[in-house]
Amino acid sequence: MRNVSRATGFTPETARGAVLLEVLLALMLFAVTAAIITSSMNASMDGLERLKLNTHAANLAATTFAELELGLRAADASGEQAMEKPFDAWTCELVRLGAENESGEASDLTQIEVILRHKDSELVHRQMQWLKLTEPKVSPDEDSPLTARTTGGVSQ
């Protein structure tokens, strides 16, 4: 007579098959869980990188507006221009729009839009501000105080 358990009614061979099935099911659940956690972490890291680039772009835009207000940068720059090192992965474009008040007269405020693009990603950051511009204090052929500060004060 075959060895049959009275409690379950299974033979030892069918019990081994059930254990194997349970192990395979547990392994499959583990693999699915690991895949979900990995994809979640990947999406989180992508979001973190996007946030870092957007914050960096906002800081560069604020710096550009400050340079314009202080007269360290001309607002008449045309087209996309590469940023200086260590920001050489970014390009900056200034769009200058004239401003009129309600009566149609020219205002002393100028609408400036700074468009920053990151070369390695598809990030484009646009920021607009109304500024009262002053004439640049540095001519284009002279070294800018900003350039001297970013290069460690060493003239090139």
Image (cartoon, rainbow, N blue to C red):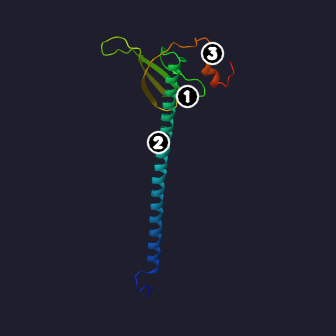
Amino acid on which disc 3 is placed: Asp
Provide the secondary structure element on which disc 1 rests: loop
Amino acid on which disc 2 is placed: Gly
Mark 3 burial class by Cα count in 10 Å: few <14, some 14-19, many 20+: few
Residue to which mark 2 is pinned: 47
Amino acid on which disc 1 is placed: Ala
**Where, quadrant-wise, is the C terminus in this rendering?**
top right
Q: Do callouts 3 and 2 mark residues in contact (Cβ within 8 Å)?
A: no
Residue under the point 43% across and 19% down: 95
Provide the secondary structure element on which disc 3 rests: loop
| Residue 143: image tag | 3
Residue to which mark 1 is pinned: 89
Nearer the observer, 101 or 126: 101
Question: Can you tell which of label 3 and label 2 is closer to the viewer?
Answer: 3
Question: Can you tell which of label 1 and label 3 is closer to the viewer?
Answer: 3
The spot of residue 140 in percent (x, y) is 58, 12
The spot of residue 29 in percent (x, y) is 45, 61
* Real-space CA distance between mark 2 and mark 1, rounded to the nearest whole angstrom: 19 Å
Residue under the point 50% across and 44% down: 45
Task: Choose the circle earlier in sequence order: 2 or 1.
Answer: 2
